[in-house]
Amino acid sequence: MSTSKKKVQLTKKQLKELKETVQAERERLTNKLNLDHPHHTINNSDSGKDEVDSANDDILRRSEMRFATREGFYLKKLTKTLGLMDNEEYGICEDCGSNISFTRLKARPTSTMCIGCKEESERNEMQNYHGRMSKSLGKSVSFSS
Ligand SMILES: [Zn+2]
């Protein structure tokens, strides 16, 4: 019998710990997003400063919307992470297929890339940002040798 073929490097205990973190985080976010909505509006008791209120309200709404979007995005990520955990696909780099270290997962439970691939993709982003020149130059070195 070979159990060594299994790709998941995390122990059950580690996985449980991470799962609990993600679940707690998801719960906290869900509550927060639900709470954001109802009683947050300004009461009628403060009449007389309508204009200021509506201006503030507008700013508030806008920042809340941006906030909600970012939180919502994170919430989706957390849900996806839980799904990966259930399928035992968690902790595996989606780029190169190697294991993501527990230390990294503990710091960022939603990581889907190992540190090497993450750094590389960040480098690529930088390169794309600065233009494609360097990339094509790198590809056409073959002529000199
Ligand atoms: Zn990787």
Image: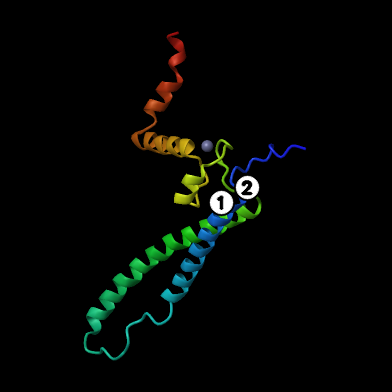
In the rendered view, tell whether residue 14 sits above or below residue 1. Answer: below
* x and y, in percent, of residue 135 in the image: 41, 27
Q: Looking at the image, which residue is at 44% across and 35% down?
A: 120
In front: 65, or 8? 8
Q: Is residue 73 left or right of residue 84?
A: left
In front: 126, or 26? 26
Q: Which residue is mark 1?
A: 14
Q: Residue furthest top?
A: 145
Q: Which residue is mark 2?
A: 89
* x and y, in percent, of residue 105 in the image: 49, 48
In front: 30, or 21? 21
Q: Amino acid at mark 1?
A: Gln
Q: How many marks?
A: 2
Colouring rule applied to residues? rainbow
* x and y, in percent, of residue 145 in the image: 45, 8
SS of the residue under disc 2: loop
User: Can you tell which of label 1 and label 2 is closer to the viewer?
Assistant: 1
Q: Whole-Å distance between the Cαs marked 1 and 2?
A: 14 Å
Q: Is residue 103 left or right of residue 15?
A: left
Q: Would you say residue 76 is visible in this rendering?
A: no
